[in-house]
Image: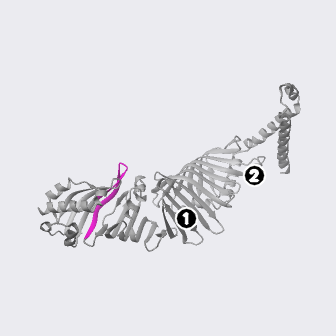
Amino acid sequence: MAKQNSFVKNLKNISKLINSLLEQNLNKLKFDNLKILARNNKIILSVVAVFFFLISYLLLPTFYKQDDISKELKNELLSKFNLDFSFNQRLNYNFFPRPHFVSKDSIIVKNQKNIAEINQIKIYVSLDNLFSIKNFKINEVILDNANFELNNKNSNFFIQILNNNFLDANLKIKNSNLFFRNLEKEVLFINKIKNLKYYYDQNELKNILYSENEIFNTPFSLEIINHKDEKKLDTKLNLSSIGLKIENIHNYDNEIKSGSTTIHLKKNKSFIDYKSNKDFFKFSYYNDLDKKKFLYNGKLNFNPFYSHFDGTAEELNISYLFGTNAIIAELLRTNIFNSENIDFKLNINANKIQNNRNFINLFLKSKIQEGLIDIDNTQIEWKNNTIIKLTDTLILVKDGKLFLDGKSQVTIKNVKNIYKFLLTPKNFRKQIKKIDFRFSYAFDEKVIMLSDIIIDGEYNQKVNEKLNNIYFRGSSMQNKIFFKNMTNDLIKAYAG
């Protein structure tokens, strides 16, 4: 061992001597001195000798037995990253641009099961100890075009890798896929890993995972810092395409994990406190103004997989959920919900609607199931005079635009107050208890189309003919005079 280190030191000393001689003679390279310099055999011999020794040294791994190389590299990978690799094909050695081994069709084994199939692996080794296989030091590993198979039992696979020592070695994963399956081995989602890297940050003095990914056609970046001593993870998730950034602090000291999350959605900011274990995830969600005014409680079950969220709010901004640029609209356009494996329910109670004081007591009931989003049985009151209930209603995307299609049932509690508000002439004030109709609302254009109006169980031809000649746009609907005139025209057509 001492002889090997001595040889490496001699190579470095010879290299320094050559650099010194070159620096001293480069300034003398004039045309008249070329013949003199050519006669200086010491420089030429030194360069040739160093080149010969360097190439010989770099080529040493090609003479080692394949089984020995495979065994030692597997042991080193297991020691550094706690990853059990198996090489199905030969490990080929290259020394340009730096010494490394390449192999095709490798796998990673965990708990006697294949967790990843790797098309190509590159293992870069240090220059210091090429004389002995047992002294190889890995300084970087690159996995290219790999497929990872995860489920609820091994979902923390990538997090566990952070517990290793990356002070003198990096691990990279490129152009790969992560398949997450349920217990029935059905694929819940596929996460595309474009570029992932584990490394040691000299400033943070911590291991860091940074990854650029894509899920449901939505690109995002992820950064995780592992504080081993405190048993805490700092995570930053960035979905710049929809203006969403999530920062999370996760404590994993106990069996039931806990944490807090800060969500930045464009100019809005909110918080989540949560608890979780292998079977569930429970949380409370609130904004930074007042917990009582905006609060959600929810639970996600992993086995079987389903989710249920309940929320309360003193005042709710509907555009925050379903506006043109709201998060749900953006996610719908990415087809993120087009999966049969998603089972999601969201219920919200709100006393008031922001920017519309006439509507009160909203109960929003929604679910996402088998790729469809419906808000059946959602209801809201108008001025304590009517109850509007939605049935057979879906939110969907057509040609890249967001629509709400369905049926509505209006139950009238006090028709006299409605006629007073509309200033309807007394001779047209007929008793009305219930109105049913179909509708389609385009969120982007803020246009609503009504059809098939049925009043107290009867279809009225005059009302429906009148309705076909009326164009409902958001700005005109907000105009009280237009709204009153339009509604009175329909009432007059119904009264005959």
Q: Examine the structure image and report whether residue 474 is included in the region drawn in magenta.
A: no
Highlighted magenta segment, given as a residue range: 386-405
The residue to which callout 1 is attached is 248
Tell me if label 1 and label 2 are in contact, CB under 8 Å: no
Amino acid tagged 1:
Asn
Compared with 375, 121 (above or below) is above
* Whether residue 491 is visible: yes
In this rendering, position of residue 410 left or right of residue 425: right
- Give the quarter of the image for residue 254: bottom right
Frontmost residue, 471 versus 19: 471
Amino acid tagged 2:
Lys
Frontmost residue, 29 versus 397: 29
In this rendering, position of residue 319 left or right of residue 496: right
Compared with 312, 395 (above or below) is above
The residue to which callout 2 is attached is 134
Helix, strand or loop under label 2: helix
Q: Position of residue 252 (x, y in %)?
A: 58, 69
Helix, strand or loop under label 1: strand
